[in-house]
Image (cartoon, coloured by chain):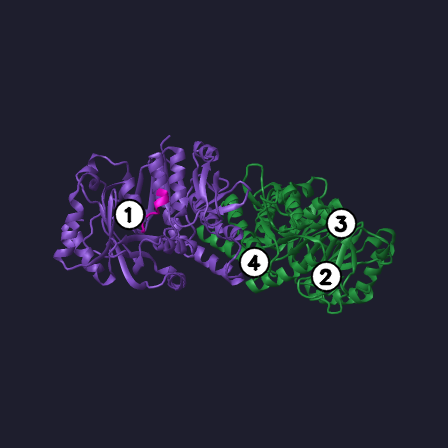
Chain colours: A green, B purple
Amino acid sequence: MDIVVQKYGGTSVGSIEKIKFVAKRVINEKKKGNEVVVVVSAMGKTTDNLINMSKEICNNPNKRELDMLLSTGEQMSISLLSMALEAEGYKSISLTGFQAGIKTQGLHTKNKISDIDSEKVKKYLQDEKIVVVAGFQGINEDGDITTLGRGGSDTTAVALAAKLKCPCEIYTDVDGIYSIDPRVYKEAKKIDYISYEEMMEMATLGAGVMDARAVEIGCKYNVPIYVALNNGDIKGTWIKEYDERMEERVITGLTISENNLMITINNVLFKSNNIARIFERLAQSFINIDMISQTAPVNGYVNVSFTASKDDLEIIKDVITKINDEIRGIDVSIELDITKVSVIGIGMMNQSGVTSKVFKIFADNDIEFKQVTTSEISISFAIDSKDKQKAANVLAKELNL
Amino acid sequence: MDIVVQKYGGTSVGSIEKIKFVAKRVINEKKKGNEVVVVVSAMGKTTDNLINMSKEICNNPNKRELDMLLSTGEQMSISLLSMALEAEGYKSISLTGFQAGIKTQGLHTKNKISDIDSEKVKKYLQDEKIVVVAGFQGINEDGDITTLGRGGSDTTAVALAAKLKCPCEIYTDVDGIYSIDPRVYKEAKKIDYISYEEMMEMATLGAGVMDARAVEIGCKYNVPIYVALNNGDIKGTWIKEYDERMEERVITGLTISENNLMITINNVLFKSNNIARIFERLAQSFINIDMISQTAPVNGYVNVSFTASKDDLEIIKDVITKINDEIRGIDVSIELDITKVSVIGIGMMNQSGVTSKVFKIFADNDIEFKQVTTSEISISFAIDSKDKQKAANVLAKELNL
């Protein structure tokens, strides 16, 4: 029995007509002789509408109850898709998260899958039924309904594929993974194959097609993931183990992350442990710091810069006011329009020339960068947002993305 | 620990504002020192909207999947009500049918409660939580989500009260049980106490306030049921065991059932078993026959009349065409505007005068009746629908309803 897990997101099941269309695609797969498990998200704007209803009750609704509410979205779409399959004469059964054995742990609205009891899914597949599973949801040890947070349906699909030892196809409204977001650089090239590691790095650094968590599970259990358009037969992208087909490539992709700000604190007395105190205060307010750079001490004083999300601006201002009171003589400034540009490629591990090449491209094109950080397979630059488009164009062109 | 089960129907939770209002009422009950279990239906027109969505998929959607779809309606309202209670500072937890241990059996969309595992509900009550349970739904032996059909939320509420050995309060958009529908007879009197048997008879004969099934469970487990308005503090009606307060009353209520038709078949040869053949044909087409009357044979021939629902008109016409072909010489007519008027009262059991009294009222007021049937605690008359209002008025006045 060859099994395949297919996942269709919210826009793919956004109307009754679209659900009928998805049913036809699933039936085509079944006709090829495969057993099919379909994971679906809530229809279109359903989740947003449910969140808005809860906000009418109160600003900060109880999160256990919010999970109870949000999980109805996927329950609606699984039942409608299963009806559509039955109406076409195919045996089908829909399963909520708890019925499909998706066990989770953690905080409500942000649960993680801890295990999947796939016996029921396997039994229905043996009965030749098309199994339609609600994405994004599960059940915790207390028997409460939970949701998995952002990218949750992808995670459900890949985790089910891992358990069923089969590939996972993610159908979405983009036709694959691009070396650079085609909305930023029109001549961006689609990637045929990308390694889990590169995809995780790209997802973390801002490529929105897939959530890093789903890719991480794919990597851990070696699930081949295929990302493609939900409509038509255009060739998509395989996310899989690094292999010879990827070896020729030094740089796989470029991501652009906006919505950043940069804080610079000058004249911090180095010896007094003041740097540690600053980051302790930020951590206490749950502010995620991204890139950090610090100059070498001059006369015992250092300058430090770091980036964070613009969403945290108000909290950051509060913290900085406190720090200004605690540490005398420092000089704090905030820059609000910072873009992070990252170059990613597993081939960079063995090639030292990439960093200098990017430095040269920036210098040749008068692009000033404010910070640099590197990982084994990526380099990131913080630049002024006004240079974003120019940086994307020259890097994409020079690095042949 | 004094427990009370309160049930709020679809109109009572028809908007976020109304849900907040229900939360306030539940909190008032909690403040009295009672532990509260709240059973709610889906918001307003939600169930109708979901059914319409399923009809867009196909005319006759798979019923297991329809149950999966419909059950989301109550899941939404329980989570929103529980959020509203939490927002007011009260500990609350919502439970779907399966979480509340509501076990069911039977056909999808028409399941019956087979048992309730109330351990979880009891545990949460001991933790002083307000427990909000989804009405109308449960889980069957296969782990499928099921729904209970018409009046299902009332059934959930009364069955839970039976298990918790506590009273059940049904809050609705009418302020109690009336001796006769106030829309038909403006001076109708509200009943303070009514026995289970009378209420079941009234529900079966057309009083729409409560479903007969819920009352039957109340009767079996002796659950006191209080029916009252969801808004305000007007005294409602208690449904309970027959007791001395009800004894003075001979007649409790009058129900009016419309949407009936009457078929009369004349000149049926009695000896040839043709009567049996007619009803066999009707039964084969799943037509529910209500009142039946047959004249004594004259020269070996009889006339027979029976009533049925107007909804079955087309099927009845088909059957009659067949019967006309099979049995020669008969003469069939259908009357389309038949109203059934029923007089109900447990006191009638020991009083033979009621039938003759009603006959006299009809005769005095020139109301012709076409059929009569009786049970231990009721008498029903089939009359022409044009006499409906007149019959209601004179019976209500003369019988002091």
Label 4 in the same subunit as label 1: no
Q: Is residue A290 shown to the viewer in this render?
A: no
Label 2 in the same subunit as label 4: yes
Secondary structure of the residue carrying numbered label 1:
helix
Q: Which numbered dot is residue B202?
A: 1
Residue to which mark 3 is pinned: A295
- Of the pair B43 and B189, the residue shown nearer to us: B189
Residue B208 against residue A103 in the figure, above or below: below
For discs 2 and 3, the disc positioned in front in the rendered view: 2
Based on the displayed image, in which of its 4 quarters is residue B46 positioned? bottom left
Q: Residues within 10 Å of mark 4 (few under 14, many from 20)?
A: many
Rendering coords of residue A161 (x, y %): 70, 48
Secondary structure of the residue carrying numbered label 4:
loop
Residue to which mark 2 is pinned: A176
Disc 3 vs disc 1: Cβ atoms closer than 8 Å? no
Disc 2 vs disc 3: Cβ atoms closer than 8 Å? no
On screen, residue B50 versus residue A323, left or right, reads left
Disc 2 vs disc 4: Cβ atoms closer than 8 Å? no
Secondary structure of the residue carrying numbered label 2:
loop
Q: Chain of mark 4?
A: A
Rendering coords of residue B137 (x, y %): 46, 45
Q: Which numbered dot is residue A43?
A: 4
Distance from Cα at disc 2 to Cα at disc 1: 64 Å
Secondary structure of the residue carrying numbered label 3:
loop
Residue type (three-letter) at the residue carrying disc 3: Thr
